[in-house]
Image (cartoon, rainbow, N blue to C red):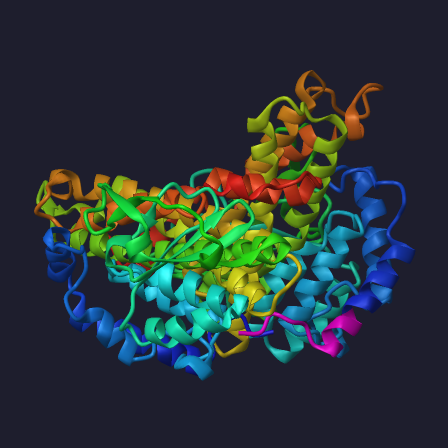
Amino acid sequence: MDLTFSDREEAFRVEARAWLEANVPRESIPSGDTAEGFALHKRWEKKLFEARWSAVSWPKKYGGREASLLEWLIFEEEYYRAGGPQRIAQNGIFLLAPTLFEFGTEEQKDRILLRMASADDLWAQGWSEPNAGSDLAGIKSVAVRDESRGGWRLSGQKTWCTRGAFCDWMFGLFRSDTSAERHRGLTYFLVPLRTKGVTVRSVDRLDGDAGFAEVFLDDVFVPDRDVLGRVHDGWNVAMATASSERGLSLRSPGRFQATAKRLVDLYTRYGDGSDPSLRDAVVRAWMDAEAYALYTLQTVSRVSGGGTIGAEASLNKIFWSEMDVRMHETALRVLGAHAELVDGAPDAIDGGAWMKGFEFALAGPIYAGTNEIQKNVVAERVLGLPRK
Amino acid sequence: MRFAFTEEQQMLKDSVRALLARECAPTAVRAAWSNADGRVPGLWAKLAALGVVGVTAPETHGGLGLGAIELVAIAEEAGRAALPEPLIETTAVALPLLAEIRDPETNARWLAAIASGSAGVSVRLGGAPHAAYAHAADLLLLQRDDELHAVGRDAVTLEAQRSVDGTRRLSRVTWTPEKATCIARGATARQAVAEAIDRGSLAASAELLGLAQRMIDMTVDYTKIREQFGKPIGSFQAVKHHMAEALSALEIARPVVYRAAWSVATSAPDRATHVSMGKAFASDAALVVAKKALQCHGAIGYSFEHDLHLWMKRAWALAAAWGDAASHRARVGAALFGAQFSMASTR
């Protein structure tokens, strides 16, 4: 057992910290889930890219630094420690890219990754459909073969596409063989959103921001070069993405540690010191964030030693999503009657960010596979309980 | 950075596990409940022969001279087997404490004897109300204010206290401090005792991990074969969710305890806080797991005849001993918010 960082890792941290301290905007940028905020966030993503910080773990030719998993964790920790803005490029960088690295052709990687790292193309995910949420294999959107043009014609409806109204591309699953059952007969497609036959309608989230979109596809042509992985093998390809989403890359510990630190600070400024249960909740939140960081380090050690992230990723997702809700609930308790003040109300504390954060946290147990589904996965695939 | 046991540490862990699987089966744990001393006959000597008892004792006194990481690896296996022996008191607390105090006479007489298993030791430190396995001890390490005393069994009066865990033989210790029994005082004693209590908390945390893991294993095995409505109850979502929550609580606690071991082993400045985090997580996890395990076993788990309670009751006892989750969180809070922590709050 050795919990120390190497000189190289420490040097990486120093470099990241220095750059972030000099470059993270002092003023917070409006939410990236609004048109105005999205444009500003895109500019920030470009700045990250230009300094090679947008996708640190990637190969240099795609704009990365070939950072190790551990260095990636260090970067994330420093990023959130410095108060870095929300990452609007994350669905591409953290969800699609790992799948591209595993299943993509050289042509696809060369064409897509650099533009993703530089935020020239921003990506939305296209998993859910109106009647396929937790039951993702129940998707109905279809891909019909167009042999003459060398591609597929997509039709159907995708929903809950994060920032879909502002994105350029979407990745998702379509039913390419309607005679096959459920998980079989699906193909993973990369779909341009600004093309003939695509209609994107933004959908406001719980907090009122246009963070979601519905995407309607009406006979949209997608060439063969935009199929990711093998035809009809989309479920396996997608699950690779899903496990990186839950397992490591979507929610690094750094952001929760930063939230916990802000909560401790909030409590010391405004907390009711006469309420020991409130103090205990704050301590618990801080400990939870530490525990999650340690849990992640353990996972990184395992992966670096040749192990894989399998169904254990579901445990991870359950933990961080529930922790995030608890931390924000605790912050709202600290704020008391001020908690309800939002959107820069003159008397709002921290601009009302805690209520906004609470609303966002509430989505955690729902997206990326509801926690109920994750618990089934843990019980069946980690503990080995019978499926039926 | 390698957040995992080394090959040597894993081998030690595996060998303890194998020994306990052979020598400390559930039947032996159950039998220990009705033994005079609450222990498994002959087992302590076998553990000593393997080097387990003296793993933390200096090599000059017949020990292996190893540290907190090996201690945690062993204690986790002790928990898995619900080992009814004074491992925490002896290996985690007394041996390193004596080695730290370096009282020549006491150490010459006792260290090697304890490490080899031929002499027994018990401790009552901090705010702990009772000493475990004191009846079987030849020597007791007792704290009073800022003095630490090494007292022979003959010089104390023990009043037995029944624990919910029938193997945990507890006693109230009545004794009179003598000048001759005092082996450390003042800041030296305070510091050494605080570190000893932390090692006790750390070992208890690791035992709780092992206890929780075993309760999960037992429950998974049972819910796979127990059928109701024509299928295994483990196929029902309500049962699956209980078990996923149990595993989730355990798995998040594990790295926190291991990190505490690392911090103690390397004398990290935050080690006390890290130990407290580990004990808080491990105590909470074991209690959650115990509750879920009982619920998923249903009525059979509620019977005295079934083995689950042997593990569950140990978990209840150890979750509260060496400081419960709330008192350890309070200590973390004191570090976070800069307040003072007094040793008395480790109940």
Q: Position of residue B147 (x, y in %)?
A: 53, 51
Residue B174 vertical placement versus B2 (above, below): above
Q: Residue at x 40, y 46 (%)?
A: B176
Residue nearer the viewer, B312 or B29: B29
Q: Indicate the position of residue A335 as horizontal and vertical percent values.
A: 69, 23
Would you say A131 lies left or right of B32 here? right
- Compared to residue B155, the image places residue B238 above or below, namely above
**Residue located at (46% from left, 83% from top):** B60
Q: Is residue A358 visible?
A: yes
**Is residue A138 among what the camera can see?**
no
Task: Please indicate whether residue A364 sits to the left or right of residue A113 in the image.
Answer: left
Q: Which residue is at a point 27% across and 46% down the rendered structure image? A: B158
Query: In the image shown, does B147 or A128 lie closer to the viewer?
Result: B147
- Let me know if residue A9 is in the magenta part: yes
Quick check: A83 left or right of B2?
Answer: right
Q: Position of residue B151 (x, y in %)?
A: 38, 57
Query: Vertical placement of A274 versus B133: above or below?
Result: above
Where residue B61 sits: x, y (%)? 42, 80
Identify the magenta region: A1-12
Instruction: Determine which quarter of the picture holds residue B290.
Output: top left
